[in-house]
Amino acid sequence: MAHRPLRTGKNGSTAHALALLSTIALLLTSCSSNGAEETGGRVEDGATDSNEAGPPDLGEPQDLVTDLEVPWGIDFLPDGSALVAQRDSAEVVLVAPDGTTSGAGTVEGVSHGGEGGLLGLALDPDFPEEPYAYAYFTSDSDNRVARIRYDEEAGELGEAEVILEGIPAADTHNGGRIAFGPDGHLYVATGDAQNPDDAQDTDSLAGKILRMTTSGEPAPGNPFDDHVYSYGHRNVQGLAWDGEGDLYATEFGADALDEINLIEAGDNYGWPITEGPGGGEEYTDPLITWEPAEASPSGMAIAGDSLWVASLRGARLWEVPLIGEGEVGEPRAHFVDEFGRLRTVLAHPEGDALWLSTSNHDAWGSPNDGDDRLMRIPLE
């Protein structure tokens, strides 16, 4: 695992020097502190943090729902309940804060295969005045974004209206996370669909973060006058904004390094020319890198001035302190190997808990009794 605690922007010799000095200072500080040691998948009490307010303590995880099947996209309704999309069946479940469930409908047109299926889900930020859910899914020919009316009183989804199609699809590297930014526009994370060179082509929708209106048009001010917001991505599955409006994204590496990136409009994040830092001035370096065995990062949320990253192969929840102005502290791992593969993490709107889902019914998972599950983790 490596991290780059400075917001350096483009790579260059000055940035490397500053980052090296910052890393040395951080290591010296860590040596003089209590340090954080993992025991049984949890971080010991007394672990220090660079955030003045200190990180939240995590309470004991509590099962909200069990026996789900690859819960992928999740978003909250105003009453604190959530819509949960299941990848393989394309079924959406309504989950109340106490864990009570009911079926909300099935998204038509979904074709599951490999990592494809019903993926990201996001509620309109003006819900219920704009009574729509948005879904990212794989069809027989491509990946698509659809708008779906949601009847809150009946608890039912209507028909899906496709607002963006033609996102390349494959058995793997479909991306899939969608989320509304603080600007009210919908951000869509895509993968390279096993064609790495497409990530460098700004005329392609593959290997990108897209930014669009709720009708599917390119958002005003996009850097290339199309849907593309940033490019050079291999497979992005996590999006989150901090209180300063900075956008962070998780990204699966190939064989060397997984990443967390600070996303800037128009920036090139290097894939497939480079993986991790040091590719040259024309590429933006990641803030954090891990070996894939430690991470394979999917969903991401921000709560308590920390990034929380659900890891699949790494089978742990990473906490990354946010110092401010794009700087991050030393990552810490929680629940190592306790729940298997972790797919999606969200901060509950009341600010008192994280909701965390497993993904053990993946082809690479080993389901236990009750998997897949959606858990509530108190923030204390």
Image: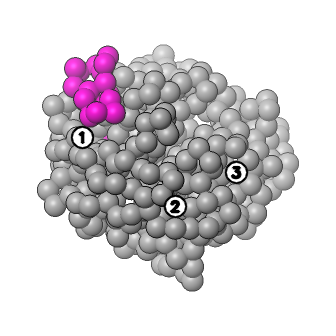
Q: Is residue 320 left or right of residue 173?
A: right
Q: Is residue 114 left or right of residue 94?
A: left
Q: Is residue 280 among what the camera can see?
A: no
- Mark 2 surroundings: few (<14), some (14-19) or many (≥20) residues within 10 A: many
Q: Establish if 119 lies above or below 93.
A: above
Residue 309 versus residue 49: which sits nearer the camera? 309
Q: Position of residue 262 (x, y in %)?
A: 47, 30
Q: Establish if 242 lies above or below 357.
A: above
Q: Quadrant of residue 141?
A: bottom left
The residue positioned 26% from the left and 61% from the top of the image is 108
Amino acid type, label 3: Ala
Evaluate if marks 1 and 3 touch, with contact meaning CB atoms under 8 Å apart: no
Magenta part mainly helix, strand or loop? loop
Name the residue that disc number 3 marks: 353
Residue 300 located within the stretch drawn in magenta: no
Q: Secondary structure at mark 3?
A: strand
Disc marking residue 94: 2
Amino acid type, label 1: Ile
Name the residue that disc number 1 marks: 163
Q: Position of residue 355 (x, y in %)?
A: 61, 55
Q: Quadrant of residue 211?
A: top left
Residue 127 versus residue 210: which sits nearer the camera? 127
Q: CA distance from mark 3 to mark 2?
A: 18 Å
Disc marking residue 250: none
The residue positioned 74% from the left and 33% from the top of the image is 50
